[in-house]
């Protein structure tokens, strides 16, 4: 059923419906639409549209739907819903009845889709940043392994001066570092939340949009409702960044295709990224690299298409803007896949060091060194340049390298040339003399590799960070506690109790979002319990639970607590964190205080485990992934 049918007396033509509907591609926004809907339900509770019980019922149903979507996203495509927003609403109404119809109060599909798309872009952006890091790490590792591998440098595809394979790798590291910077900047600019902007003029309810933005992990709310629903700058910025990075990937691919050719024979790609010929059995084709080079055009096309779509578009939402997604999805998927393939091409790569050295020694690549030698002897550079050009012609006619000319022959070009010319014409000398910052000298290349490794290691810090909870985390904590309590995994905790105990909670952050919580409750006897452990639906299996447990154990150790226990239905998880089974009879405080509240007290299936902190060393782990 469409969300807008009341105004119409006739059904839409099936051909128009097929033309108009976007579910076939915007189904990818399902998780973001559900996350945004949970946040909106909390905002509606704050202004009295929903009661606390209604909001918790909606949140539980939405989180269950999110888990179902994560298990099988393709299920959405079996629906005849118009778009992902109507699909989510239909599913919600199916689960909770008419209550589901209240969720759209004060919200428009215009601000809803703008929010969904920004959430998706932010999530994809972080994945792309990690892939850029991975590609740079791969290039840096190859550079480290080939610091002494000489490679001919080219200009105009003519051999120019010798470099090293490491220096060549680092050139692309720098390109991808700029891509990383551009993408980071784009993500910073899109870090504003449009939700609460309504169709174009704002919402009629007194929603705290700043709090709403923070609950979704945005830095702030957008400032103008009309711009909020019209803005697609972030889409074009991401497409532009992807296009520039694909340009860099295509240059990398072309270099490697040339190096891999039979004429160059500098490298050999692994069998895992090459294919053969159906006719010529000797062929080993660099298909992965050629596809990277070829896919560059489709990303450019998405950028051009998006810019033409938005060009001269009047403000507020127009249906043209539905065209923002297919090109964006395809372009970012393509960029990610191409980076992954580029990194894979360096797995098992073989560099023919003898061949690269031989090529570097050909083509008179040490001619500049001879010119510099003459300058050091007092000859102006332009004159030295001419003298060396004449010497190169003579060497070509003789069929030998410059360094193979005799001293007598050398002196014929300039009387200042002496025996000391030969050491400076070696490959080693050519490299060592390029010792300024960014040059190809071995010490500069080693420095560049070390700096890159340090930069990347800082960014490779674990994605999950754990910190003490703040009152601003209360909504997120309450939502997770209510969700897992609804599933029977935790005891329910009223909001006033959470406010009172906020100091005992720790939260896990992933990509700036609060995605997990747990508390350390200390009893009068000094015994402590880890409780209210919960992970945001859809964020499981990313290390938050382990990080939270280790953080709280470290906190307990600092407080000189000797025993920490837990009651759980997943003992295997806690046993991996060094907890051991214990008897519930040894936990009288727990039995007296909490078990009477438990709906399963007469059929308890929880297992008691404990860890003795006075018998083990607790490793600080605030940033454990």
Image (cartoon, rainbow, N blue to C red):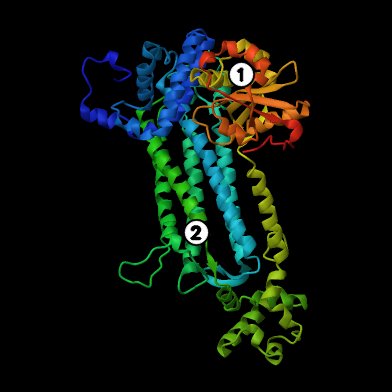
Please give left or right for residue 501 compared with residue 25 in the image.
Answer: right
- Seen in the picture, residue 404 relative to 33 is either above or below; the reply is below
Give the residue pinned by disc 2.
345
Please give left or right for residue 54 compared with residue 134 in the image.
Answer: left
Residue 229 image offset from top left, x and y in percent? 45, 25
- Seen in the picture, residue 492 relative to 31 is either above or below; the reply is above
Q: For the residue carrying disc 1, how many other residues have a C-alpha within 10 Å: few (<14), some (14-19), or many (20+)? A: some
Q: Give the spatial CA distance, label 1 vs label 2.
A: 47 Å
Q: SS at mark 2?
A: helix
Residue 193 image offset from top left, x and y in percent? 53, 25
Q: Residue at x 49, y 14 (%)?
A: 56
Q: The N terminus appears in which quarter of the rendering?
A: top left
Q: SS at mark 1?
A: helix
- Seen in the picture, residue 83 relative to 178 is either above or below; the reply is above
Give the residue pinned by disc 1.
474
Please give left or right for residue 547 compared with residue 332 in the image.
Answer: right
Question: Residue 309: in sight, yes or no?
Answer: no
Using the image, tell me which numbered label, if any, was put on residue 456. none
């Amino acid at each position: 059923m469409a969300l807008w049918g009341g105004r119409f007396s006739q059904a839409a033509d099936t051909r128009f419906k097929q033309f108009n509907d976007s579910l076939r591609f915007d189904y990818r926004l399902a998780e973001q639409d559900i996350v945004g809907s949970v946040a909106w339900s909390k905002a509606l509770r704050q202004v009295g549209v929903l009661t606390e019980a209604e909001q918790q019922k909606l949140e539980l149903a939405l989180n269950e739907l999110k888990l179902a979507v994560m298990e099988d996203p393709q299920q959405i495509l079996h629906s005849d819903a118009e778009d992902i927003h109507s699909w989510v609403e239909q599913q919600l109404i199916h689960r909770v009845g008419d209550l589901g119809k209240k969720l759209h109060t004060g919200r428009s599909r215009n601000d809803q889709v703008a929010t969904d798309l920004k959430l998706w872009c932010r999530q994809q952006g972080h994945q792309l940043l990690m892939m850029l890091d991975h590609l740079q790490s791969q290039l840096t590792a190859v550079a480290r392994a080939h610091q002494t591998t000489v490679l001919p440098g080219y200009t105009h595809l003519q051999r120019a001066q010798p470099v090293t394979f490491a220096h060549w790798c680092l050139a692309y590291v720098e390109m991808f570092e700029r891509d990383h910077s551009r993408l980071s900047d784009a993500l910073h600019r899109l870090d504003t939340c449009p939700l609460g902007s309504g169709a174009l003029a704002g919402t009629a309810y007194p929603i705290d949009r700043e709090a709403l933005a923070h609950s979704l992990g945005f830095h702030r709310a957008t400032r103008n409702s009309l711009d909020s629903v019209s803005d697609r700058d972030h889409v074009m910025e991401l497409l532009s960044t992807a296009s520039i990075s694909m340009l860099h990937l295509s240059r990398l691919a072309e270099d490697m295709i040339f190096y891999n050719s039979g004429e160059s024979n500098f490298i050999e790609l692994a069998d895992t990224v090459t294919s053969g010929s159906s006719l010529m059995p000797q062929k080993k084709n660099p298909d992965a690299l050629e596809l990277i080079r070829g896919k560059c055009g489709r990303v450019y096309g998405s950028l051009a298409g998006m810019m033409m779509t938005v060009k001269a578009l009047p403000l507020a939402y127009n249906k043209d803007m539905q065209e923002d997604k297919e090109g964006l999805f395809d372009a970012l998927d393509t960029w990610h896949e191409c980076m992954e393939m580029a990194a894979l091409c360096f797995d098992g790569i073989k560099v023919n060091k003898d061949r690269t050295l031989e090529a570097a020694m050909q083509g008179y690549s040490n001619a500049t060194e001879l010119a510099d030698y003459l300058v050091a002897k007092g000859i102006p550079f332009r004159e030295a340049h001419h003298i060396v050009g004449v010497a190169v012609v003579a060497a070509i006619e003789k069929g030998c390298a410059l360094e193979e000319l005799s001293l007598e022959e050398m002196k014929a070009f300039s009387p200042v040339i002496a025996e000391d010319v030969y050491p400076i014409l070696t490959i080693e000398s050519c490299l060592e003399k390029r010792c300024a910052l960014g040059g190809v000298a071995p010490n500069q290349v080693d420095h560049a590799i070390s700096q890159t490794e340090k930069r990347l290691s800082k960014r490779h810090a674990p994605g999950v960070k754990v910190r003490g909870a703040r009152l601003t985390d209360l909504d997120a904590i309450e939502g997770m506690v209510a969700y897992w309590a609804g599933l029977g995994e935790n005891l329910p905790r009223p909001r006033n109790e959470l406010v009172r105990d906020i100091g005992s909670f720790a939260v896990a952050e992933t990509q700036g979002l609060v995605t997990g919580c747990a508390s350390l409750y200390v009893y009068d006897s000094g015994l402590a319990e880890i409780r209210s452990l919960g992970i945001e639906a859809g964020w499981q299996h990313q290390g938050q639970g382990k990080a939270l447990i280790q953080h709280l154990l470290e906190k307990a150790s600092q407080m000189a607590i000797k025993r920490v226990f837990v009651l759980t239905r997943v003992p295997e998880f806690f046993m991996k964190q060094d907890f051991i089974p214990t008897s519930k009879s040894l936990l009288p405080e727990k039995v007296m205080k909490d078990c009477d509240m438990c709906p399963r007290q007469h059929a308890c299936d929880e297992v008691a485990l404990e860890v003795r902190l006075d018998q083990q060393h607790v490793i600080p782990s605030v940033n454990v992934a």
